[in-house]
């Protein structure tokens, strides 16, 4: 098995990229570019899954009886993994809200156009 520090850094790296992608998705949604927002979510998921796979290998080894002595670095990696998951959940909710806001703005514009004709 790889050195535990290297494993931890791999998890941190993958999920760090995932978090950045999820936050970029929110920015794109705020700009009204929901297609790009969705692509950033997919890209983030791909990175998150890589980090999760690395973490799952640790769990598999533990289940086989190969104990891992936790380090602060590994705890940090797991914390980053969990925070990336939380950020994704929040990003998806924010994207949904931006879509709803966008629809409401369109409705308001259509209402204003209808009133100006009268």
Image (cartoon, rainbow, N blue to C red):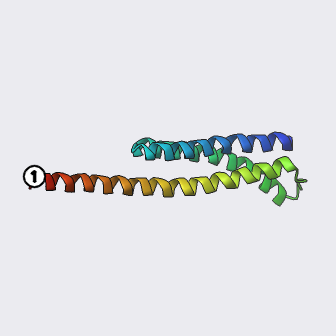
Q: Horizontal placement of 12 versus 41: left or right?
A: right
Near-viewer residue (53 or 100): 100
Q: Horizontal placement of 62 versus 33: left or right?
A: right
**Whole-percent x, y for residue 33 in the image:** 40, 42
Q: Residue furthest left?
A: 118
Near-viewer residue (113 or 16): 113
Q: Quadrant of residue 10?
A: top right
**Whole-percent x, y for residue 111 in the image:** 20, 57
Q: Horizontal placement of 28 versus 116: left or right?
A: right
| Quarter placement of the N terminus | top right
**Whole-percent x, y for residue 25 in the image:** 50, 45
Q: Residue at (85%, 44%) from the top-left corner?
A: 4
Q: Horizontal placement of 34 versus 64: left or right?
A: left
Q: Residue at (68%, 50%) from the top-left corner?
A: 52
* Mark 1 secondary-structure assignment: helix
Q: Residue at (56%, 45%) from the top-left corner?
A: 23
Near-viewer residue (5 or 23): 23
Visible in this render: residue 51?
yes
Visible in this render: residue 1?
no
Q: Residues within 10 Å of mark 1 (few under 14, many from 20)?
A: few
Question: How many callouts does the rendering have?
Answer: 1
Up-down relation of residue 14 to residue 52 (above or below): above
Near-viewer residue (14 or 84): 84
Residue at the disc numbered 1: 117
| Quarter placement of the C terminus | bottom left
Q: Residue at (46%, 53%) from the top-left corner?
A: 95
């Amino acid at each position: 098995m790889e050195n535990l520090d290297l494993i931890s850094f791999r998890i941190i790296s993958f999920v760090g990229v995932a978090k950045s992608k999820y936050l970029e998705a929110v920015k794109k949604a705020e700009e009204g570019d929901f297609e790009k927002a969705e692509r950033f979510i997919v890209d983030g998921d791909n990175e998150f899954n890589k980090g999760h796979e690395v973490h799952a290998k640790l769990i598999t080894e533990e289940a086989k009886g190969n104990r891992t002595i936790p380090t602060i670095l590994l705890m940090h990696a797991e914390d980053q993994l969990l925070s990336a998951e939380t950020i994704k959940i929040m990003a998806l909710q924010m994207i949904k809200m931006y879509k709803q806001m966008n629809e409401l703005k369109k409705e308001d514009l259509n209402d204003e156009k209808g009133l100006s004709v009268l």
